[in-house]
Amino acid sequence: MKKKSPTIPLAWLAKGSEAQTAVEFALVLPVFLLFVFSILEVTWLARNNLLAASVAREGARSLIYGDTTNTAFTAMTNRITPVQLRSKIRVLYWTSTAAQNGSSWSPWAAADSGTNNGVPAGDLIKVQLILTNNSLTGLIPLLNNQVATNYTTMKREAN
């Protein structure tokens, strides 16, 4: 009667074709994981770009209906904060008089008055949102600190 050898963990690695399979798996797994994490990183970057565009639209929409700048800024910041993205929000406006004179956009100069932002009806409001992408996994350095700049321009409505 043949004596049974003691059971050794991972003994299957020592056998012919099984050992080859284990080596192939060990070589393919890192490449596969890099591929999967690359897809995650690119998807994260695209999602953040869409988020930036959406937040800029929401801020401009809020301002054209007369909300104060504080209300609009708070709403935009609250929307960005949960994903912990670094952002810079800038609001510009262009009066109809400036448009006739050929002037360019000027920084927000409208004084908030109570519950209104003080921009006359018919003037254009432009929201610029600069969003810096934080890498999800850090595996692809090129995607870290990518900057997405989104502009949204809307016309101020009458109250």
Image (cartoon, rainbow, N blue to C red):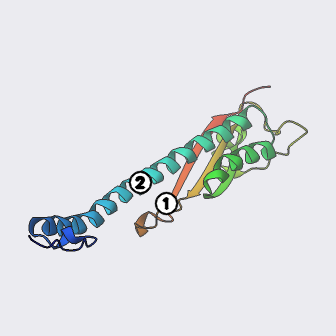
Q: Position of residue 34 (x, y in %)?
A: 33, 63
Q: Amino acid at mark 1?
A: Leu
Q: Secondary structure at mark 2?
A: helix
Could one spot residue 104 in this view of the protein?
A: no
Q: Do tag 1 and tag 2 residues touch (Cβ < 8 Å)?
A: yes
Q: Which residue is mark 1?
A: 136
Q: Position of residue 153 (x, y in %)?
A: 61, 40
* Residue at x 52% of width, y 55% of height: 148
Q: Secondary structure at mark 1?
A: loop
Image quarter of the C terminus = top right
Q: Is residue 43 above or below residue 9?
A: above
Q: Which residue is mark 2?
A: 40
* Residue at x 60% of width, y 53% of height: 83
* Residue at x 42% of width, y 69% of height: 141
* Closest to the observer, 32 or 49: 32
Q: Amino acid at mark 2?
A: Leu
Q: Count residues near mark 2 (Cα–Cα under 10 Å), then give few for <14, some for 14-19, many for 20+.
A: some
Image quarter of the N terminus = bottom left
Which quarter of the figure has residue 99? Answer: top right
In the rendered structure, the answer to whether residue 54 lies left or right of residue 31 reads right
Extreme residue toward the right, this view: 114
Could one spot residue 46 in this view of the protein?
A: yes
Q: Position of residue 15 (x, y in %)?
A: 13, 70
Which quarter of the figure has residue 26? Answer: bottom left
In the rendered structure, the answer to whether residue 72 lies left or right of residue 9 reads right
Q: CA distance from mark 1 to mark 2?
A: 8 Å
* Closest to the observer, 4 or 130: 4
Extreme residue toward the front, this view: 1
